[in-house]
Amino acid sequence: MTGNVSIEEISYSHKDFTIHGVACGDKHNDIVLCLHGWLDNAASFLPMLPLFVNKRVIAIDWPGHGYSSHRSMDAHYHFIDWVYDLVQLFELNQWKNIDVVAHSMGGMVVSAFAAAFPEKIKSLTLLDSIGFISAEAEQSTAQLRQGMLSRLKGLNKQKNKHMSVESAINARVSVSDLNYEQAKLIVQRGVVKQQEHFVWRADSRLRATSPYRLTLAQAEQFIRDIKTPVQLIYGSEGLDMVPKGVKHFGPLFERFLSHELKGGHHVHMEQPEATVQLINAFI
């Protein structure tokens, strides 16, 4: 944290679920909405939040992540349902024409949202994320089978238990590009104590294989339909799919620019000052 900027807990309740998050800045200032990636949570934006000036910066926990509600047992975590989460959140708050910053999975979700609801997004900054995960139409049946079997297997899967928060942090470090301090921010918000152990707050159904993928033609159409200005900030050691996506999807955007920073998939945590400087200049 920097200076005397205070971080506050926030929540938005709608019918059967509540979305939690963190925020800072004057409530009367223009909003910057931050959307995290798969199995992260709002804390992944904590290094960035205090660096914005004259903005109301809000970072949410997606449903099934962090402190937010899990979906009901008769539902699941389909890609299109994430888009509907945004539709409901924007409707609940009557947000219009706001700036959005989105990492990884969050970037894919808001890209689809921006294509369908261009009036809602003023500018879009993608963090190590561009385009969509897609598959050939011929793979649809195999993808469905894998998704259904994965879901069935997940019904009997036990959550990983850790004897301490430190153990959970080390486990996260071992499977990511995060260092200890970066992982600590995410893990502290991402675990809960149950009896003598700590378990992940994230809904275990998030790990199920998706039963469907967009075709490449569908993914390309979404990108073509995005009319808002788009900026990509990506890490030099980030996801391999991002530089490839710049070449494939970049020309399909109506207004697009990109910046490479030294770092990995969580480059916004590694270089928060440089990232926010680029965002501020863009918006």
Image (cartoon, rainbow, N blue to C red):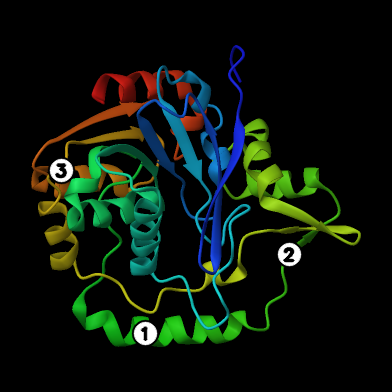
Mark 3 Cα within 10 Å, few/some/many (few <14, many 20+)? many
- Which amino acid lies under the numbered mark 3 shown in the image of this protein? Gly
Which quadrant would the N terminus be assigned to in this image? top right
According to the image, label 3 marks what residue? 250
Residue 31, picture quadrant = top left
174 is higher (above) or lower (below) than 154? above
Which quadrant would the C terminus be assigned to in this image? top left
Q: Which mark is residue 144?
A: 1
256 is higher (above) or lower (below) than 214? above
Q: Is residue 177 left or right of residue 125?
A: right
Foreground of the two, 183 or 94: 94
77 is higher (above) or lower (below) than 222? below
Q: Is residue 185 left or right of residue 80?
A: right
Residue occupying the point 38% across, 45% down: 239
Q: Are marks 2 and 3 in contact (CB under 8 Å)?
A: no
Residue occupying the point 60% across, 11% down: 3
- Under circle 2, the secondary element is loop
Q: Are marks 1 and 3 in contact (CB under 8 Å)?
A: no
Measured from the top left, where is residue 256 in percent x and y? Answer: 15, 36
Per the model, the C-alpha gap separating discs 1 and 3 is 29 Å
Measured from the top left, where is residue 116 in percent x and y? Answer: 19, 58
According to the image, label 2 marks what residue? 160
